[in-house]
Amino acid sequence: MADLNEASIPLFAATNTGSLSLRLTFKLLAWLYEADKLDRDELEAIAGGLIAELGSDAERFEQWQMLRDWVPDLRKPRDPAKSAAVERKAA
């Protein structure tokens, strides 16, 4: 897992306040995930909804990459057993 206290938010790359807000929101989501307050499905659903609102494919790709840098678990394949447990919990 990444040390999120050491992860920097690339503010220089935030071209507007919307971009900065999204970066800060992703940092918060990453912290919640690290603290086991969100599971992977919840994290991806929230982030996916936010990213879907972005204008271009390039912007969406860049934001997913940034989130994957902060949450390395997102780079790993899903664990089928864990996904099944989440589905049972939701039912």
Image (cartoon, rainbow, N blue to C red):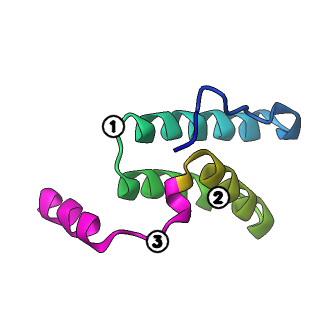
Amino acid type, label 3: Pro
For disc 2, the neighbor class at 10 Å (few under 14, some 14 to 19, many from 20) is some
Q: Nearer the viewer, mark 3 or mark 2?
A: 3
Tell me the magenta residue range: 73-91
For disc 3, the neighbor class at 10 Å (few under 14, some 14 to 19, many from 20) is few
Give me the residue at 60% from left, 26% from top.
Answer: 5
| Residue 24, visible in the rendered structure | yes
Residue at which label 1 appears: 37
Q: Is residue 26 above or below residue 43?
A: above
Residue at which label 2 appears: 64
| Residue 49, visible in the rendered structure | no
For marks 1 and 2, the one nearer the N-term is 1
Label placed on residue 52: none
Residue 87 painted magenta: yes
Residue 18 painted magenta: no
Pinpoint residue 26: horizontal percent, then vertical percent. Answer: 58, 41
Label placed on residue 77: 3
